């Protein structure tokens, strides 16, 4: 790479990262440039690592970063799967599937990439509208259909061992992760080719998904939810730590007067050594009131998981779910319970629905009646919901009374602030009684938690 | 310190630390650019070990600041020896200088700044410390100097190689992150984990190490409350050796699963999904 083309590429890449929402500061851009001077630019993985070390400081940004890196610094081929080497353009499909089967269990990174590249070259080009062609992953995957290789790979790998046991489970896991690597390699090469045809900037803008922590709770897919579940425990720990610290007095605790005086006797009454009482960690109590209706179902799912995780952090957490009436759902979250099972049981067994349309007012009233004494002067009250009440009475006074009894009260709303008060949203009315925070994604939830201190 | 990322890999291997491209490049760059290296990742993936290995591989001294809630400047940086000062005042009438070197209690950060020999400063589990400590670190790591009002400004004679680790129980501040190079260590691939096991437990058979690594990968793919760490894989290997098992069959896994899974519900889930005898 010549010097000017490297500089151009560097500038373009950094620009693309910023466009994709990575907060790359000026200083960090310069750090990266400095790093390029001291590493071997032909070592692609080292180059990737150098950029990552200087520019990507949150794991959530990593997938977007990798996608853009692959576009700006595409791998060069080593000719491993040259036409001659595997005759990929003429080879029988069955031969290609044989090769894939081998790669799925034993393939190295580079080999997999080259194979994927050859396969995209052969199967990836498809008509896209009249007179146009484009590159696609699906046609490659359909032609080679990696999933259907599972049975024979298992047969081979397990060779006579008992089926259904540990060995099979482990082998399956291995093949599945191989298939995922193959799919990713195909997608990467498809993007590379599209970029070659129509410019890297264009594909970059459309290909990069927002980082996990910026995904809108209300638009989340099932697969995202599974990934988000992994974020839940760290978040719960953070929230717990925040609420605990908040209640703590002075860092060193109060002066232990007796011990200090007693110790001072040894030094002629001069208090040389000061003794402090150990700080008393207040375990706060937490009451969570969560809208579980369909309009916020993925948010509810996430917050219920959070509730579940919090259960293990606090001595006393009580959780209540509501749609148009309210039920205590703490029992589904006994410590040690399996999270997936808990969610299923909760959906089937909890009594949160009378007529099926969200009714905040009625839910608050029922809550005050049935569970009002759950809230005391040590309680933090957390309400989760979109404040859309289907034009039913709001029961603001009831909520005010509940909040007044609690030590702190917060409301997290998964809707964008611009949509508050539109339609049947009565966000502002509730906000006046319980401070409401926009909480559309994990990043905002984290920020809320961080600010609790 | 190092010639190239490849040099890092090689020298870390001599002290039994198994690196990869990302780790070696970051470690190399931190030295070459003179920047602190912030290492994040789940528990037990070798963050702390990395700092120790760098020190060992380069023959540097290791100074460690272990962070915890309530850590303050007096514990991290320096403190005046109040007791000694008082005694001195009582003992002598002359106006001795009681704010001199003699009365200074040096804590890890100051010690690292003033060290005359090559030093690796490990600031371990930074996320456990309170936010104020970050302010202190930020100052220190930007110009490697400390101002002690009574003594003046002390600048580093030779910049220490700084490694900060974090489990990300809370986000470290943007400002601190900007100042550092960043390395996220994830769970290793089964191949690499097998090699780590082999490096840590040299007497284990290679195929057993491989089986272990694959089984652990399977466990990690389940939705567990706490996934097994590399450290736990190593423990598992040691356990099998101690029990004299040389195969990881169902009864063996069932009998020793507690080494890698610490929550009862995780245990139950694994038994169910792997079809283990319970
Ligand atoms: N790359 C590696 N090479 C050799 N050993 C490793 C490696 N990674 C992890 N280990 C093993 O894992 C053990 C635990 O690592 P370490 O204590 O550094 O983890 P950690 O990431 O600091 O965890 P924690 O977050 O709990 O502090 C090490 O003592 C070592 O046995
Ligand atoms: Mg550690």
Image (tube, coloured by chain):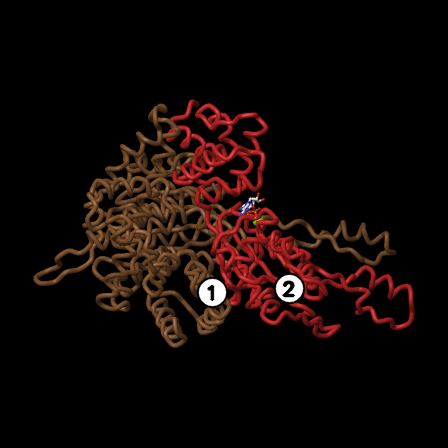
Q: What colour is chain B?
A: red
Chain A shade in the render: brown
Please report, as a chain letter, where disc 2 is located: B
Is there any visible trace of residue A431 in the rendered image? no
Q: Quadrant of residue A71?
A: bottom left
Residue A75 against residue B243 in the figure, above or below: below
Quarter of the image for residue B63 reads bottom right
Label number found at residue B160:
2
What residue is shown with label 1?
Answer: A40
- Reply above or below: A108 against B64: above
Q: CA distance from mark 1 to mark 2?
A: 25 Å
- The reply to whether the C-beta atoms of the residues labelled 1 and 2 are less than 8 Å apart is no
| Quarter of the figure that contains the N terminus of chain A | bottom left
Q: Can see residue B252? A: yes
Q: List x then y, in percent, for residue A394.
A: 27, 54
Q: Is residue B135 left or right of residue A85?
A: right
In the rendered image, residue A253, in percent from the top left (x then y), is placed at: 65, 53
The residue lying toward the viewer, choosing from B50 and A382, is: B50
| Chain of the residue on which disc 1 is drawn | A
């Amino acid at each position: 790479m010549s010097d000017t083309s490297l500089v151009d590429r560097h500038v373009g890449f950094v620009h693309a990262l910023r466009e994709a929402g990575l907060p790359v500061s000026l200083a960090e851009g310069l750090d990266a440039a400095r790093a390029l001077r001291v590493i071997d630019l032909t070592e692609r993985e080292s180059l990737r690592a150098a950029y990552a070390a200087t520019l990507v400081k949150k794991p959530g940004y990593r997938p977007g970063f990798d996608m853009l890196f692959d576009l700006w610094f595409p791998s060069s081929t080593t000719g491993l799967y040259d036409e001659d080497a595997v005759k990929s353009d003429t080879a029988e499909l069955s031969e290609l599937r044989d090769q894939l089967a081998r790669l799925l269990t034993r393939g190295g990174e580079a080999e997999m990439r080259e194979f994927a590249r050859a396969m995209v070259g052969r199967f990836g080009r498809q008509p896209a509208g009249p007179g146009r062609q484009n590159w696609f992953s699906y046609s490659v995957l359909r032609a080679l259909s990696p999933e259907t290789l599972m049975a024979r790979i298992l047969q081979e790998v397990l060779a006579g061992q008992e089926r259904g046991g540990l060995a099979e489970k482990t082998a399956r896991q291995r093949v599945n992760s191989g298939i995922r690597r193959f799919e990713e390699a195909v997608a990467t090469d498809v993007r590379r080719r599209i970029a070659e045809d129509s410019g890297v900037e264009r594909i970059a803008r459309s290909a990069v998904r927002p980082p996990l922590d910026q995904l809108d709770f209300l638009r989340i897919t099932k697969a995202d939810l599974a990934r988000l579940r992994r974020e839940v425990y760290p978040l719960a720990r953070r929230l717990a730590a925040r609420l605990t610290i908040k209640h703590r007095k002075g860092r060193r605790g109060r002066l232990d007067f007796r011990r200090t005086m007693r110790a001072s006797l040894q030094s002629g009454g001069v208090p040389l050594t000061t003794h402090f009482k150990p700080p008393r960690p207040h375990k706060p109590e937490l009451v969570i009131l969560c809208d579980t209706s369909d309009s916020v179902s993925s948010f509810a799912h996430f917050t219920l998981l959070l509730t579940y995780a919090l259960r293990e952090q606090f001595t006393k957490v009580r959780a209540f779910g509501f749609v148009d009436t309210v039920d205590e759902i703490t029992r589904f979250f006994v410590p040690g319970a399996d999270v997936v099972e808990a969610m299923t049981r909760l959906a089937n067994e909890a009594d949160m629905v009378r007529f099926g349309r969200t009714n905040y007012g009625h839910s608050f009233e029922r809550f005050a009646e049935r569970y009002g004494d759950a809230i005391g002067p040590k309680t933090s009250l957390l309400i989760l919901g979109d404040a859309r009440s289907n034009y039913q009475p709001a029961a603001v006074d009831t909520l005010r009374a509940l909040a007044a009894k609690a030590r702190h009260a917060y409301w997290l709303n998964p809707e964008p602030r611009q949509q508050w008060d539109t339609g049947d949203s009565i966000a502002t009315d509730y906000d006046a009684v319980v401070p409401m925070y926009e909480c559309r994604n994990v990043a905002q939830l984290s920020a809320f938690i961080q600010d609790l201190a | 310190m190092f010639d190239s990322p490849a040099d890092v890999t090689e020298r870390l291997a001599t002290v039994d630390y198994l690196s990869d491209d990302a780790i070696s490049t970051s470690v190399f760059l931190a030295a070459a650019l003179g920047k602190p290296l912030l290492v994040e990742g789940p528990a037990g993936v070798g963050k702390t070990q990395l700092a120790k290995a760098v020190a060992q591989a380069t023959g540097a001294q290791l100074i460690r600041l272990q962070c915890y809630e309530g850590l303050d400047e007096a514990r991290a940086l320096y403190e005046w020896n109040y007791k000694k000062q008082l005694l001195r005042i009582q003992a002598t009438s002359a106006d001795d200088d009681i704010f001199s070197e003699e009365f200074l209690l040096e804590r890890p950060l100051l010690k690292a700044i003033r060290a005359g020999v090559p030093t690796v400063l490990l600031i371990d589990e930074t996320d456990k410390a309170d936010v104020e400590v970050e302010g202190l670190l930020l100052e220190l790591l930007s110009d490697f100097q400390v101002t002690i009002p009574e003594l003046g400004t002390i600048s580093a004679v030779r910049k220490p190689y700084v490694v900060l680790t974090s489990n990300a129980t809370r986000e470290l501040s943007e400002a601190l992150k900007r100042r550092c190079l960043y390395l996220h260590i994830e769970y290793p691939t089964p191949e690499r984990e097998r090699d780590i096991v082999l490096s840590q437990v040299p007497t284990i058979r290679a195929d057993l190490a491989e089986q272990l690594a694959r089984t652990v990968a399977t466990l990690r793919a389940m939705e567990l409350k706490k996934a097994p760490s590399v450290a736990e894989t190593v423990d598992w290997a040691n356990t099998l050796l101690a029990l004299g098992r040389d195969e990881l069959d169902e009864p063996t896994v069932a009998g020793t699963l507690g080494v890698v899974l610490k929550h009862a519900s995780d245990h139950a889930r694994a038994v169910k999904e792997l079809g283990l005898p319970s």
